Image: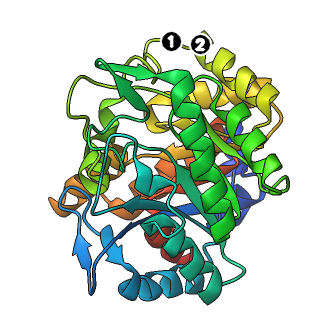
Amino acid sequence: MNDLKFNRHRRLRGSANLRSMVRETSLQKEDFIYPIFVVEGENVKEEISSMPGVFHFSLDRLGEELDEVVSLGIPSIIFFGVPNEKDAVGSQAYHDHGITQEAIRFAKDRHPDLVVIADTCLCQYTDHGHCGVIENGVILNDESLDLLARTAVSQAKAGADIIAPSNMMDGFVAAIRFGLDQAGFENVPIMSYGVKYASAYYGPFREAAHSTPQFGDRKTYQMDPANRLEALREAASDVEEGADFMIVKPALSYLDIIREVRDNFDLPIVAYNVSGEYAMVKAAAINGWVDEKKMVLETLLSMKRAGADILMTYHAKDAARWLEEK
């Protein structure tokens, strides 16, 4: 045995402090964006059945959620609005007093330093559940861009710090950037859902946002999960059109895509840890099958290790508490 030559990698694992000293990737609460679902009505705090611990909030109950987020040191939220009234063109999406716009105003008034992101899409607001204008059963790309730009401008007027368009229409970043600049919001950044796959992991979100398509699916505009190079083409287009951040969605089954995007682009990368990923861990934890804390922190760490700078996650509040315990 004395003649054997081999590397002793365990030398750097001998104690907790030594492991901490050489740790390559870190997770911190400043990494998190917390999604919040806002609805019309009064005294609404209703748990979403497929997403335990996540709620619909009416504006009169929103303050308690915002206060908790801020107290935990989470620096940013993203609003998803769920209106009472829907129509073919999603007019409540760009109404100056729509539910998302009112939530933005409320949040910025209550916590001015909180970074408020507005999800910019039409699917929650259309009666057909698709992310654009429909004609003869076809989602029209160019005709949808004007409505998306109008939505972004109305959200910026309400005080949104960041516009996050999630519709996957071709040219949406260019249209929104042009609309924002023309309206005097040239300093409002765009966090593009530029790499968004047509994924089964969105199921619980569809319940939360009341946005299930009434016919067909979204495969003609969201990406095929089998494709890798397409992600780079999509991201390159959005960067050229003026995106300031790039979201990869979902995250857990697309860690390779996060790494590809990280290696090819130098703007901040956001991993969206989506509803289905959250629901799987919650269900397993409720049944006592897994250690929720350890699994969540390991999962989020894997997204950082893959190359994400920012994590959009429903686990944010729990994770922030657990990180404080360390």
Q: Confirm whether residue 18 shows in the render.
A: yes
Query: Quadrant location of residue 159?
Result: bottom right
Q: Type of residue at label 1?
A: Asn
- Residue 289: x %, y % from top left: 20, 54
Q: Nearer the viewer, residue 221 or 250?
A: 221
263 displayed left or right of 38: right
Q: Which residue lies at the image location 58% right of the left edge and 33% below the top edge?
A: 145
Q: Are marks 2 and 1 in contact (CB under 8 Å)?
A: yes
Q: Which residue is mark 2?
A: 230
Q: Which residue is mark 1?
A: 227
Q: Type of residue at label 2?
A: Glu
What is the secondary structure assignment of the residue under circle 1? loop
Q: Nearer the viewer, residue 161 or 85?
A: 85
106 displayed left or right of 310: left
Q: Which residue lies at the image location 28% right of the left edge and 51% below the top edge?
A: 279
- Residue 220: x %, y % from top left: 40, 17
Q: Quadrant of the N terminus?
A: top right
Q: Quadrant of the C terminus?
A: bottom right
| Neighbour tally class for label 2: few under 14, some 14-19, many 20 plus, Cα within 10 Å | some
| Neighbour tally class for label 1: few under 14, some 14-19, many 20 plus, Cα within 10 Å | few
